Image: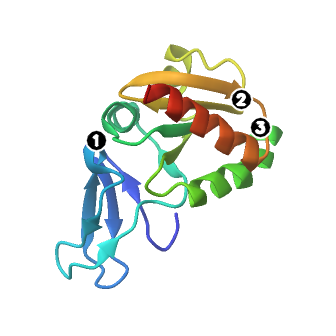
Amino acid sequence: MTERSIEPDERGLVLTCPKCGQRNRMVYARLGQKFRCAQCHTELSSPSEPIEVKKESVFEALTGQSSLPVLVDFWAPWCGPCKMVAPEVAKVASEGPGRWIVAKVNTEELPGLAQRLRINAIPLMAVFKGGRELARQAGAVPASAIRQFVEQAGQAASR
């Protein structure tokens, strides 16, 4: 986790205000809108790094309720190509605040989810919106290809 320490739960992304340290929740349905700290009213920016998803219930809430498309990177710690693509996924996350959310799911930690979604090869990227999988792409690719993949899936969803 970064200095902002963002933790997803079933209702939203919980993060610490960089100014006063207050914990705040960005509810999934309002992602992409402006959020302010409940205590000091500092504007809180959308996540610019991948969000680690550790529970199936959090995955379902994030992908089902997010107002923004959610790019999910399915990976495992033993996977060499997954390690190669991780910095590329991070670049896409840093370009996406307010446009998309990037999540990471370790298939070793959530094998039931990986099985239910038929994740047979990793790394695998999938874009979700409104609880539906819009597109998927296997393999380690550069940030430019990941960005194009997310943008195309997001455009298809808004048609």
Residue 55, quarter of the rendered image: top left
The secondary element bearing badge 3 is classed as: loop
Q: Sequence-wise, which precedes: disc 2 or disc 1?
A: 1
Is 126 drawn above or below residue 92 in the view shown? above
Q: Amino acid at mark 3?
A: Cys
Is 106 drawn above or below residue 126 in the view shown? below
Q: Residue at x 44, y 25 (%)?
A: 159
The residue that label 2 is drawn on is 122
The label nearer to you, 2 versus 3, is: 2
Q: Sequence-wise, which precedes: disc 2 or disc 3?
A: 3
Residue 141, quarter of the rendered image: top right
Q: Residue 75: in sight, yes or no?
A: no
Left or right of 28, for residue 144: right
Q: Residue at x 52, y 44 (%)?
A: 103
Marking on residue 10? 1
Q: Are marks 2 and 3 in contact (CB under 8 Å)?
A: yes
The residue that label 3 is drawn on is 79
* Figure disc tally: 3
Q: Position of residue 37 (x, y in %)?
A: 23, 73
